[in-house]
Amino acid sequence: MIWEIDDGASVVEGLDAHGRPDPAYAASLGLLPARKGSRVLASLLEAAVAVLLALPALIVLPPILADIASGGFDVDAFFARGDLVWVIVALAVSQVLTLAYVIVQLVMHGRKGVTLGKAVCGIRSVNVRTLERPKFWRGAVVRYLVASASLIVPVIGPVLVIALSPLFDIERRGRGWLDLAAGTWFVDVRRGLNPYDQKRMRIARKSVKISEHEAKAPLPSLATPVDRDAPAEYVPSARLSGGVIGAHRSQTPQPEKTDAAAPGSMVAAVPPSLATGAPPAFPVAPAAAPAPAVPSPAPPASVPAGPVVAPPQAPAAPAPGPAVAQPAPPAQAEPGPAVAAPAAPAPASAPRADVGEGIRAVLVLDSGARVEVRGTTLFGRAPAAAAGEGEAQLIPVPDETRSVSKTHVAVMPARRGVFVVDRASTNGSAIIRDGAETPLVAGHPAELRTGDTVRFGDRTMRVEHA
């Protein structure tokens, strides 16, 4: 079992070989760029609110500015006005409301990727590299400063920077000069995926990973595994598991192919099947080292003495090398007790009949329910064994959020321990050990230890004994 150790280095998904954001990856997740009409409408709504908040100052300031421009502004007459207090209050209220509006817009944009106009039009702003919330200083403050700088050239500056620059995007994602400076991208959450929905984004990223893994998966090896006790890939099939869910390939007796016997070599017999009951064959000693003969009783007295005639033997196949004569038994020997042949040891390759016996696991669900695993056990909203898998212990887990699949995980005892297998669930599974979470790869067993916590969907279960 190989465990990956998190070295703390964050890996940004969705970047090409040059470290630039890949539009194809965002499209595969279901993120769609915001339409130009929606962006223009959002900007107009935000500008209208800003004008409304500055309306008191817009009513008071134009006459004063007109007097100053014409040269007829009298300072003494201005301070002698009876409505001077209301002029000052109107200017102060407009400044305070406008400043508060700008600060709220900046904070909401940096924290949630949304402003007043974007919320109305169904637009969200994300970091173009990580597809997460934009950074506050670059994603919000820098963007606001660049937009404010465009006002230096009246009318032409805002139109060019805000309205026309998105048309020059070579990636056709609607990113203008403000987006390039802030490193942001506007997405449409009404037609596509909402990037701030963490659960759906996690599922979308995992689906893309599974698709890439299946596309690049190597062909299965036909060679016999060296370590027969190692857990094999979990394949719920009657042909591989023999009708038992979660059985490993190593538990199925495999016939061994033997080569032709060579002179003077050890000949190993094929292990017998436990089902047929055939007598086992054991290694035969080479002809150069014969086994000691067992003395046999003397012939009866009625048999006349004469040469001993050996019984006919089947002709042996010709083989190179000198022939070794077999020693003949002694003609005269006193009868003695029969010597029993030594019992040969069982072949090492014969499968054990007690595989999985005595191994137990006790799991405690987050609801407090305790489950004792005596065989293959399936957990899910409505667990069911696949066709040909045989009998299994079914543990239904209620889940109102539907984060748990119908058949989510399988826990099974084996010779070397207890293993858990993710059954290609939608939200995935993981093992939490010593505070570190290791995701499970669908179809691959992972060993459980006492004290581990298995997360499947939004539910968990703790391994109390394994």
Image (cartoon, rainbow, N blue to C red):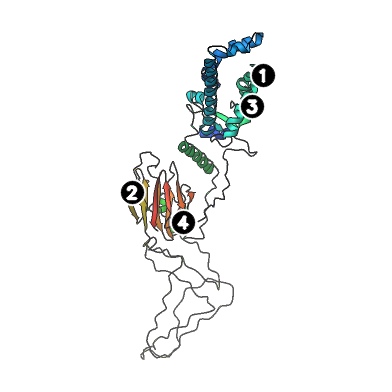
Give the mark nearest the N terminus, 2 or 1: 1
Q: Nearer the viewer, mark 3 or mark 4?
A: 3
Please report the residue visible at 44 percent of the width from the left and 79 percent of the height from the top: 311
Q: Nearer the viewer, mark 1 or mark 3?
A: 1
Give the mark nearest the N terminus, 3 or 2: 3
- Mark 2–mark 1 contact, CB under 8 Å? no
Give the mark nearest the N terminus, 3 or 4: 3
Q: Which residue is mark 1?
A: 153
Instruction: Identify the element where label 2 is drawn.
Output: strand
Q: Which residue is mark 3?
A: 170
Q: Position of residue 419 (x, y in %)?
A: 43, 55
Q: Is residue 172 above or below residue 371?
A: above
- CA gap between label 4 and label 2 equals 22 Å
Q: What residue type is disc 4 on?
A: Pro
- CA gap between label 3 and label 2 equals 55 Å
Q: Which residue is mark 2?
A: 394
